[in-house]
Image: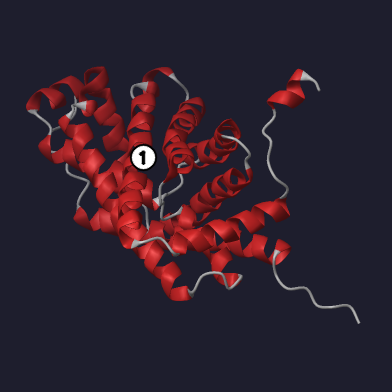
Amino acid sequence: MSDTASTAPDVHPPKKIARQATSKGEKKAGLDLPVLVALGLLAGAYIAFGGLFALVALAGTSEAVPFGPAQVLAGVVFSLGLILVLVGGAELFTGNTLLVVAWAEGRAGFAPVLWALAVAYVTNFLGSVAIAALGFAAGVHLGGDGAVGVAALNLAERKVELDFGTALASGIAANMLVCLAVWLAFGARSAADKVLVIIPPIAAFVAMGLEHSVANMSLIPFAWMVQDLAAPEFWVQAGLDPERSVIGLGGFIANLVAATIGNVIGGGLVGAAYWFAYLRPKEEEG
């Protein structure tokens, strides 16, 4: 076998991935509440770490790096979050929209699926905000003479200013890519293979500036903390007006609602399409 072939990710065929998704979905829908809470908190924390990493990658790039390469770099490093979720094990709301496959196969009831998604959403939020607060307390926003904080403010301000339709469409596209990363990871045979298949779809959604509800649960609050709580020296270093106040509760909620609805639609579309292609009952030929 050539060196090129030996380093390519080893992934199960699509039909076997669909069966894996069904099996995993059944297990996820049956998790005990304490386990689901713990793993949901971890997933929110992991995605938040990926978000903070991406902000560091974006810091100062507007002056030195063209937009496209900077976005791709941010996407690659943001992949850390989903890698931690899928390799380490955690319950991520957006990826768990693929539970629709187990429901369609009759392996998980509608109520348990809805409950698992609801608990994951709430705990993802709590874990995300906790890491955003921890990052702010640790002074992450002060990195690069305040460049990280500036990157956070610029990104969050763009997000809260999106109209509902744009954020909805963006959320659909974002979670299609996230769920494709999860789907491919279901079929990966090793941790290294999982990492290799996760990075491209995640890098793509971040590079395109799409809306991921769980990522925004940390990115917007972190920037909000910078806006309202940063010390005067930050504003001096950053060269910004300390009175700027674009990020608020209304904008955060509006973004989260639109992104969440879009994420549910996007993930549901991916799961439903693969169920239809590989798992739906076939009519017997007469």
- The percent position of residue 122, horizontal first and vertical second, equals 29, 58
Which residue appears farthest toward the right when viewing the image? 286
Is 36 displayed left or right of 240 in the figure?
A: right
Q: Quadrant of residue 269?
A: bottom right
Camera-nearest residue between 66 and 12: 12
1, above or below 82, in the image: above
Q: Secondary structure at mark 1?
A: helix
Q: Residue 168, image x and y in percent?
A: 44, 59
- Colouring chosen for the image of the structure: secondary structure
Residue 159 visible to an observer of this rendering: no
In percent of width and height, residue 13 lies at 73, 48
Residue 237 horizontal side relative to residue 100, left or right: left
Vertical side of 83 occupied by 43: above or below: below
Task: Answer whether residue 4 is visible to the viewer in this image.
Answer: yes
> Where's the N terminus, which quadrant?
top right
What number of labels is visible? 1
Q: Quadrant of residue 94?
A: bottom left
* Residue shown at the point (51%, 40%) measured from the top left: 202
**Residue at position x 20%, y 43% from top?**
224
The image quadrant where one finds the C terminus is bottom right
260 sits left or right of 100 in the view:
left
**Dot 1 amino acid type:** Tyr
- Which residue in the structure is indicated by mark 1? 46
